[in-house]
Amino acid sequence: MSKQTQSLFPFSVMGLLIGRTALLKDHILDRNLVPYSVTAAQFKVLIMIAHFGMDTPAELCRQLSLDSGAMTRMLDRLEQKNLIIRRRCATDRRQVRLALPAEGQALADRLPKIGADAMDELLGVLAPEELAMLEKLLKKILFAAGDTITMQRLGDPQ
């Protein structure tokens, strides 16, 4: 192993741990969403529309790091489930606006509780002070990276 590889190794382990934790979070979320016939990926789209005020596919693509083709397929599935509505913008017909019909809004109202239950399952092994420290560290990382959602929702990390 070269010296350069050795110096990068701890960061590689950290990346693995963060990535595996994110995958586990989505797995737990998928399991909690089975009764609603929604996936973790669809959950994220619905949360962004209902609770973060995002109403265009382009915004969702940017915030969720999805390409437009994947987003179109996801929105197609959500529309087939009657959980979203796509409408052409009245002032610019090239733009699509997203909204929630009554069924989509009813589910969106339940999503924070479903998500909280999944996070409790994931993070339940941590003591309260460990959980507080993890939250503080994650906020610090996201603020330093300029994550707009974290900044808008949580304000100053101090």
Image (cartoon, grey):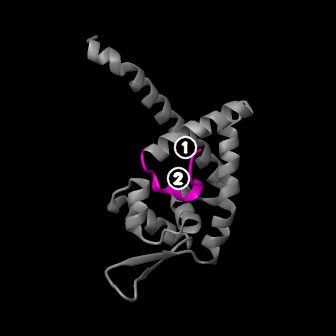
Which residue is nearer to you in this view: 18 or 33? 18
Structural crowding at the residue carrying mark 1, measured as other residues with C-alpha within 10 Å and reported as few (<14), some (14–19) or many (≥20): many
**Residue 21's spot in the image, x, y percent?**
54, 35
Q: Residue furthest right?
A: 128
Residue ID at (48%, 40%):
141
Residue 26 falls inside the magenta stretch: no
Q: Secondary structure at mark 2?
A: helix
**Residue 47's spot in the image, x, y percent?**
57, 61
91 versus 62 height, above or below:
below
Residue range corresponding to the magenta coloring: 145-158
Residue ID at (68%, 53%):
114
Which residue is nearer to you in this view: 111 or 37? 111
Question: Could you tell me which quadrant the C terminus lies in?
Answer: top right
Q: Is residue 73 visible?
A: no
Q: Answer with the quarter of the image where residue 27 lies.
A: top right
Q: Which residue is mark 2?
A: 150
**Residue 49's spot in the image, x, y percent?**
53, 67
C-beta proximity under 8 Å, tags 2 and 1: yes
**Residue 129's spot in the image, x, y percent?**
71, 32
Residue ID at (40%, 68%):
57
Amino acid at the residue labelled 1: Lys
Circle on res. 1: none
77 versus 118 height, above or below:
below
Q: Which residue is mark 1?
A: 139
106 left or right, relative to 12: right
In space, the residues marked 2 and 1 are separated at their CA atoms by 7 Å
Question: Could you tell me which quadrant the N terminus lies in?
Answer: top left
Q: Is residue 133 visible?
A: yes
Q: Answer with the quarter of the image where residue 35 lies.
A: bottom right
Amino acid at the residue labelled 2: Thr
